[in-house]
């Protein structure tokens, strides 16, 4: 059967509008389409392919576990799940892990845990959840309601209640909503989808203090910022603030679907047997791969490399911008960078994405005004240079109409 892009419209629900070309093969930070055209990958599967495509150690882990044991359900536990949980708890503030298959599901678990914890310890009036405008937490109905873009949550009927939104980086707006009835504050310690927006030190510390003052749990959604992307294993490690619950997915599986919620032992007590679950959660195949991802990413070579590669990107983007004057600033950290368009190019991020695609470069947007790069943490320097050369041609194409 010949597979074409036209087939997409014939057989798929139209909620996505993918590019014209269909990738068929990837190696490191290069991807090939059906016609054997080669692309440089600055998108990384939306901050997922943390070690590029088909990393030999991940392929090895997949094959090894694939010939041993794929799936059990949670009626039985398994070795990869327990080994991964041991590593995640040894490496972070957390001492308990819950597994899911995606970021949204990890967040769903975090929100349900927070509500149960508040009920167990304070009573049912403590159910308010506060999050931030422009925040993104996934597409289940609860997580999309907690997310800060109404466009994503409207039109699906009555929403889960007691969810309110403050302004990111504006402590007063959070303060105005908070009370002893606040059960949790959920935030990204670096907003991704919302436009690559970093919190100020003062803001994160203030959020933590307000949570402590009102006995509310602080949930960090590190689905996009986690697993080495900022140059630290988790972004919170750079902020001097520790959450009560942390969610991780995307890069955790390096391209294999897996998610996890991490928390402290006393809070975890509220997810008693039967309160929550997932058929696939803790699947041995997924956990074996995630374990390998952690082993490879959590090394000085990879984490220090992220900072060096960030500088290469920043220098290259600056040189392009000196020539074409399209960006007002470059935001973000490590291998999660956003080029914010200046006044003249407002609303045109997608034009830069399409022009990049024409130059055989895969990039992302974060909203209408930011071009986003979320490549592999180990993207070779020569691929960065080649990708930036292609990006320069794409920028020139947009500027010259
Ligand atoms: C992508 C993302 C999610 C949702 O993850 P899925 O795996 O798509 O469900 C949640 N939170 C943040 C911060 C994300 O970037």
Image: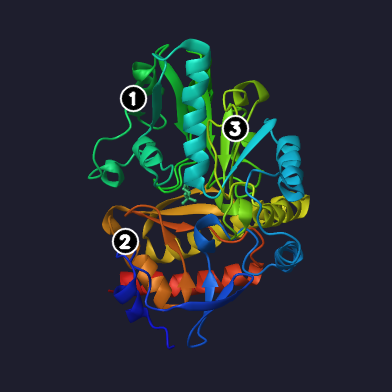
| Residue in the picture at 48% in, 26% down | 203
The first of marks 2 and 1 along the sequence is: 2
In the image, which is nearer the foreground, mark 3 or mark 1? Answer: 1
- The count of marks equals 3
In the displayed structure, does residue 244 sit left or right of residue 136?
right
164 and 341: which one is in front?
A: 164
**Number of residues whose C-alpha sits closer than 10 Å to that of mark 2, classed few (under 14), some (14–19) or many (20 or more):** few
Q: Residue at x 22, y 45 (%)?
A: 155
Horizontal side of 95 relative to 393 (left or right) equals right
| Element carrying mark 2 | loop
Indicate the quadrant where residue 9 lies: bottom left
Regarding mark 3 in the picture, which secondary structure is present there? Answer: loop
* Residue corresponding to mark 1: 162
Disc 2 CB within 8 Å of nearest ligand 1 atom: no
Percent across and percent down for residue 391 are 46, 70
Label drawn at residue 15: 2
């Amino acid at each position: 059967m010949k597979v074409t892009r036209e087939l997409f419209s014939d057989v798929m629900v139209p909620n996505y509008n993918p590019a014209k070309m269909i990738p068929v093969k990837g190696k490191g930070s290069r991807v090939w389409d059906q016609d054997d055209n080669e692309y440089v990958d600055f998108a990384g599967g939306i901050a997922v392919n943390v070690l590029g495509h088909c990393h030999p150690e991940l392929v090895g882990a997949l094959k090894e576990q694939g010939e041993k044991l794929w799936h059990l359900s949670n009626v039985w536990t398994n070795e990869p799940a327990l080994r991964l949980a041991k590593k995640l708890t040894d490496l972070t503030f957390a001492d308990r892990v819950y597994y899911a298959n995606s970021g949204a599901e990890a967040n769903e678990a975090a929100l349900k845990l927070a509500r149960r914890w508040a009920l167990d310890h304070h009573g049912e009036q403590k159910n308010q959840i506060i999050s931030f405008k422009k925040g993104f937490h996934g597409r289940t109905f609860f997580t999309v309601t907690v997310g800060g873009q109404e466009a994503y949550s409207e039109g699906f009927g009555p929403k889960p209640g007691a969810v309110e939104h403050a302004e990111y980086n504006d402590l007063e707006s959070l303060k105005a909503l908070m009370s002893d009835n606040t059960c949790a504050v959920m935030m990204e310690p670096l907003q991704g989808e919302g436009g690559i927006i970093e919190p100020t030190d003062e803001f994160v510390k203030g959020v933590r203090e307000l949570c402590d003052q009102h006995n509310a749990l602080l949930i960090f959604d590190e689905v996009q910022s986690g697993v080495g992307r900022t140059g630290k294993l988790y972004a919170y490690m750079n902020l001097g603030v520790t959450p009560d619950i942390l969610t991780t997915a995307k890069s955790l599986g390096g391209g294999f679907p897996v998610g996890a919620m991490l928390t402290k032992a006393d809070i975890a007590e509220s997810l008693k047997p039967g309160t929550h679950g997932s058929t696939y959660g803790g699947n041995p195949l997924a956990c074996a791969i995630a374990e390998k991802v952690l082993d490879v990413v959590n090394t000085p070579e990879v984490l220090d490399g992220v900072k060096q590669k960030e500088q290469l990107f920043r220098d290259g983007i600056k040189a392009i911008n000196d020539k074409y004057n399209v960006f007002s600033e470059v935001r973000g950290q490590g291998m999660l960078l956003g080029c914010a368009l200046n006044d003249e190019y407002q609303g045109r991020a997608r034009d830069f994405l399409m022009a990049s695609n024409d130059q055989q470069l895969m990039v992302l947007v974060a909203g209408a005004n930011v071009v986003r790069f979320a490549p592999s943490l180990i993207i070779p320097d020569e691929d960065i240079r080649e990708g930036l050369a292609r990006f320069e041609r794409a920028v020139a194409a947009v500027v010259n109409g």
